[in-house]
């Protein structure tokens, strides 16, 4: 078991080292800079999608209050609501739907 933890730690260190050893001229390329800016957004969107649509028992897709709350959050973001309003509003909406 400890070998897996050590291997994961070494892998993370080597990945970080690889990122630091990339030449500056490669990072200055506009396409690379744009992709590097969009990767965190894509990863966060994938995590949100998995958490919203995953069934608690690991079965099929779950269409419940989480999906409705995500839709409300998207609507509030389109309306340029402050971040805290989006978070608390969608959480309260999900809680209200679960209560009903």
Image (tube, rainbow, N blue to C red):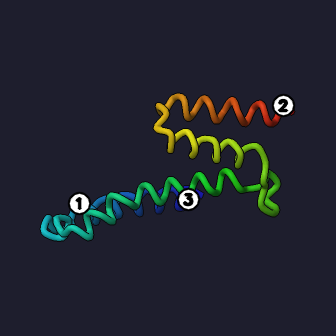
Residue at the image position 33 percent from the left and 58 percent from the top: 37
Identify residue for label 2.
99
Question: Of callouts 3 and 1, which one flags the residue occurring earlier in the amino acid sequence?
Answer: 1
In front: label 3 or label 1: 3
Locate residue 88: give its quadrant.
top right
The answer to whether 83 appears left or right of 69 in the picture is left
Locate residue 62: give its quadrant.
bottom right
SS of the residue under disc 2: helix
In front: label 3 or label 2: 2
Give me the C-alpha separation between circle 2 and circle 1.
Answer: 50 Å
Of 26 and 7, which appears nearest the observer?
Answer: 26
Give me the C-alpha separation between circle 3 and circle 2.
Answer: 28 Å
Question: Of callouts 2 and 1, which one flags the residue occurring earlier in the amino acid sequence?
Answer: 1
On the image, the x and y values in percent for residue 57 come to 82, 54
Question: Of callouts 3 and 2, which one flags the residue occurring earlier in the amino acid sequence?
Answer: 3
Identify residue for label 1.
20
Q: Residues within 10 Å of mark 3 (few under 14, many from 20)?
A: few
The answer to whether 76 appears left or right of 20 in the picture is right
On the image, the x and y values in percent for residue 69 come to 67, 42
């Amino acid at each position: 078991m400890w070998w897996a933890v050590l291997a994961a730690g070494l892998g993370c260190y080597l990945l970080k080292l690889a990122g630091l050893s990339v030449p500056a001229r490669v990072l200055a390329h506009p396409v690379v800079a744009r992709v590097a800016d969009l990767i965190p957004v894509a990863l966060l969107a994938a995590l949100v999608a998995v958490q919203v649509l995953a069934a608690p028992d690991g079965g099929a897709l779950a269409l419940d209050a989480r999906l409705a709350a995500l839709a409300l959050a998207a609507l509030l973001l389109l309306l340029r609501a402050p971040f805290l309003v989006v978070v608390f509003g969608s959480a309260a909406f999900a809680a209200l739907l679960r209560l009903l």
